[in-house]
Amino acid sequence: MDGAGPPAIRSTCPYCGVGCGVKLRPTPGGLTVEGDPDHPANHGRLCSKGLALGETVGREGRLLTPLIGGKRAQWDEALALVAGQFSQTIAEHGPDSVAFYVSGQLLTEDYYVANKLMKGFIGSANIDTNSRLCMASTVAGHKRAFGTDTVPGTYEDLENADLVVLVGSNLAWCHPVLYQRLLAARAQRGTKIVVIDPRRTASCDSADLHLKLAPGSDVAVFNGLLRFLWEGGALDTAFIRAHTEGLEAALDSASSDTPGATGLDPAELAAFYRLFAGTERTVTVFSQGVNQSISGTDKVNAILNCHLATGRIGRPGMGPFSVTGQPNAMGGRETGGLANMLAAHLDLENADHRAAVGGFWGAPAIASKPGLKAVDLFRAVQSGRVKALWIACTNPVVSMPEADSVAAALRVCPLTVVSDVSAETDTARLADVVLPATGWAEKDGTVTNSDRTLSRQRAAMQPPGAARHDWAIFAEVGRRMGWRTAFDYQSAAEVFREHAALSGIAAGLGRDFDISALAEITDAEYDALTPVRWPLSATRTGGRFFGDGRFFTPTGRARLVAVRQTPLAAEPSPRYPFRLNTGRVRDQWHTMTRSGKAARLSRHLGEPFLQIHPQDAARLGLLPADLALVTSPTGRAILRVLVSGDVAEGHPFAPIHWTGETAPAARIGPLVAAAVDPMSGQPECKAGVVAIAKYDAGWHGFAVATGAFTPQTPYWARTRADAGWRAELAGTATPEDWVDYAQTLFGIGGEPAILTDPARGTTRLAFHLEGRLRAALFVAPGPVEVARDFVAAALDQPAGDLLAARPGAGRADPGPIVCACMGVGRNAILAAAAEGRDLAAGCAATGAGTNCGSCRPEITDLIARTTVPRAAE
Amino acid sequence: MKKLVIIGAGMAAGRLIDRIADDWSITLFNAEPRGSYNRILLSPVLAGEKAFDDIVTHDADFYAEKAITCRFGERVTEIDAAAKTVRGEDGVRVYYDKLVIATGSTPFMIPIPGHALDGVIAYRDRDDTERMMALRPGQKAVVIGGGLLGLEAAAGMQARGIDVTVVHLMDHLMERQLDPAAGDLLHRALTSRGITVLCAASSKEILGENGRVRALRLANGQELPCDLLVMAVGIRPNVALAEDAGLEIDRGIVVDDAMVTSNPDILALGECVAHRGQLFGLVAPLYDQAAVAAETLAGRGAAFEPQETATKLKVTGCDLFSAGDFAAGPGREEVVYRDPARGIYKRLVLEGDRLVGAVFYGDTADGAWFHALIKDGTNVAAMRDALMFGPGFQGGDALDPMGAVAALPADADLCGCSGPTFSRALAA
């Protein structure tokens, strides 16, 4: 069947910032997905999430029409409402009374139009993005050191390096394909890998050294490194003299820090320092562990300092390397979709830049001061300063710190607009207007990955219902707000050409981002665009930055920044004695709105959990699989206990993915305090303080059903199964009648199969319809012992011994019954005969013929027939 | 040669003869005019699933080959224990060195008015079976007794197109083997195949016409017309001969562990005996007794040890099994499984960590395994979680309650892909 049909459609994966190429083939039921062997990011490889993409494009849960106040509405009505109310709010309260909160999952074209509308026409910079939670500290650090937000290197540098340092990055799980590239290169050249992370992660499995540093002490580690390099004469003084400034102050500052803050064994630290000092081809990869911190920007600069001081930047196999978490975080940065940027890497505060952009756009009211960054933005919504908010393609009620406050803010906001693929997100449920947007594999446009490679996302499927592209929705609202010409776009290609043309103007102002070579491409060329790394201008194509020592600061020199190790936002106390780290798991992404649709991605870690050190667990009386109540100054969560020596004592870890839709009690956002980095505005998501206690559930349950169901228990967590849904439950009061409870839970009637063991307090129920399993519930006083995959796989299958809660041990078909008393089948007797047993032994072994004996002649006969004839002499 | 006389050629005696050495000269009396056959399989014969010849276990050739003197159709009228002789109906005395009494039991006939009418029968032997088989489709039969035997009779006749009503005194069928829930499932299954079942129904009078049965009248006045009335309400050990011979009797003929009666030259076995005060109605212990008696006759020591017995209803389409003791009581715990869609009911009764009773309806495939657990007193604590589902679910690894959150095998592919490895993809 392969090889037939139309050629595959090449597109880009919508998950992390690696930006892998995919080949899509529409099928009657959806889409097949395979890695694109020609894409430079992945060369055909995909991770588990990418491979399962085809299972996430179903129409289930999709929003098909606009909703106003939860009721279906026409586009015209919804757009008129949005445009009218935004215009009216601006007229009454000024441009800063409205805001957009957008997403690193938007395509560049979407981002461009939204940013143009807000910064050039509404006249406010109140557009921020979930990238604020992801790499804002890197943007700020890059700009401080380089003058622009520039990623100097390319993915090939990880393959050409002799040392790769992973700082605050679980590359193995969060950027799996890039990690596989690193491992493949390591197999060839013996690359050393050092992981710097408070937690032992999957990335440590192949590490030569794992520095389990104290949370938040990255600056001390790299300040110590800078001093070590200086003391050891490992600095590149020629590069420093010719191309940098600020070394002395940086060294002074570094020397004031003590390595004790890192909590590391000095010998271990020295081993890393020696390795770094002695390895010219060194790449330092950093990610959320660096960025999500109140000192994130300083951490970035502490790392950049070491690379600048050794001149290890912009040359093959060396450089600092920020890996982003979202597919188009980089595109967002390029279009200026952050509240403190303008467009095309130009600066809001720079009058020349504003004039250039304003002139290019024909903008009536270009923003002149930074807008509200994410945390402040939602606070302004709460306080009433922002009265109309449009959230596109993101789920802040889950992902923001102090997420419960974000929900509260949306509830009081006079107008909350959400454009998304689903109305069934925690955020969309609080919106006044929900607009149906197209999703991945329906959209057309471009994304930029972590190494500046610009790739096309292409449509392979028709949008469902009345869904529209995000750029088109923003453009239509812009037109309805009165700017007909400026937003008169007919296609994504047209938006892209304008974006590319603007980048040429930015380059003329001395900026790094330049794709002006694409400003004139035709629609056909845009359609056929192959992955390409910027810059793309008349004079430059791709490659690295800064190898020539030229930076984008006013002096043209890179800045070494004096940074000091500073305390974390909160310190553990008797009331909140634990420091909670947060992060991703391998097979889920963000708030699971897409990855949660693929059943196979739920089999890896199918439930939210608290990874906690054995000593901590013992002290708290927590056993594996217990539930823990985790309380912070801002919120609480109930999580499954996963006892593990991978985390340090006192420093538990919890994944971030679960939501009100999937596990309302296990949302991590509410636990995280909204303390932010003063420069980047990025919140400190990985170092909050919490108290932990055992959650005393009266009962635990495991449920599966072919139809969606929403438990009402204090704790539940729901994921997909191949033929339905599965959920973990826990409650306090034990229901009196489990059949009644299950019928209500699943919304089905009928008499279930039921197994009860009252002395042990266990009950198991299974509902069938026409002989096939529709739903099942397993209940126990403690964590439920049940072979979950086995049970989930039984959905929609013929009835069997499901309530055994485990698969049978390969029981053979007994065959037609021979001994009716003892229920022994022909096959069992033949098997006994084949083992050479005579009648008496055969009967003893199988139980056949031991009651009434009436079957013994038949058994004798069977045995006689089975006797192996002797070979002729 | 030593002389052995056996009175009765039922299943226990048949099994004994199989095991006796050739150094005995045997005389075999049987009141029925035939040798041993498998009485248990009369129900399949009645149901038309087997022919009578299929269930004969010892035929004329067998007796001839063993040189056994067969006195079939002849009742023994007297045992003279002092003279060590027995006398048959024809008056001839036969001397024995050893005597085995295997007279079995007699069906109990409720002594209500009309019980002697023609057409009122028990369900014991071939003759009874043939009376039932002689009915024509559309004729009516009433079976008094909803126990194992009565239900097999009812199902057999129903299979022949007879209109059958079962009248049972107790609240649910097979109350000695089944609990109410299983009894109710059985009740429904029999009803659905066309048998009328009346529980808690007391028989008051059998009505006749010209000396033949016409109907059964119940205590509530209801009349059940019938052409044949089968009583299957229990059995009484046949002890009259033994009692007359002065042997010790306690409901049955008292035997010791070697199956020897109060007279050292007289053994007894089968449904006529009482061993440690217990009577026997199922075949498995009878076979065990026959084996012990054979050893005793051979001069070797052997002792009969009653085992927990399992019961299985031989009605095609009604899978029913029970074993052990399943009454509720202090210190007893039970695990119950009901699957109405598949028509399955199972109940296990535990005492401490031992299984003491099991009742299955609808799925009896693992009966032998459960029976063995009860007999052996196996500690089932570790199996309890999936015990109900039989041996096919035992012996695996303990389930990991972390399954949902810790399904992280040590050798798991780091990215969980099934695609080619990166290096392979690059090389391609």
Image (cartoon, coloured by chain):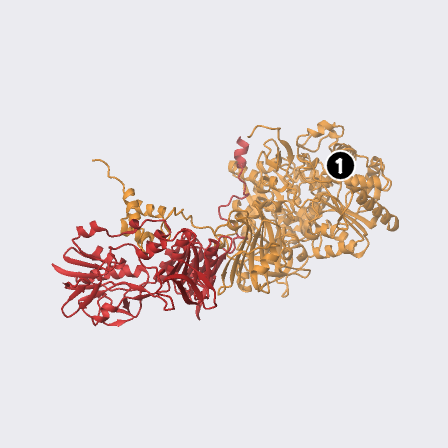
Chain colours: A orange, B red
Residue tagged by mark 1? A511
Left or right: A105, with A114 as reference point: left
Residue A438, percent from left and from top: 71, 40
Furthest residue to the left? B1
**Front residue of A645 and A764:** A764
**Front residue of A864 and A338:** A864
Left or right: A485, with B131 as reference point: right
Does residue A140 appear in this view?
yes
**Front residue of B257 and A346:** B257
**Does residue A686 lie above or below A117 as drawn?**
below
Mark 1 crowdedness (10 Å alpha carbons): few <14, some 14-19, many ≥20: many
Quadrant where the N terminus of chain A is found in the figure:
top right
Left or right: B275, with A15 as reference point: left
Furthest residue to the right? A92
Furthest residue to the front? B210
Q: Label 1's element?
A: loop
Residue A730, percent from left and from top: 58, 60
Residue A794, percent from left and from top: 52, 48
Image quadrant assignment for residue B372: bottom left
Quadrant where the C terminus of chain A is found in the figure:
top left
Residue B391, percent from left and from top: 40, 54
What is the number of callouts on the image?
Answer: 1
**Does residue B278 lie above or below A83 as drawn?**
below
Query: In the rendered structure, the residue with mark 1 lies on which chain?
Result: A
Left or right: A397, with A794 as reference point: right
* Residue drawn at point x = 17 percent, y = 69 percent: B81
Amino acid marked by disc 1: Arg
Does residue A262 appear in this view?
no
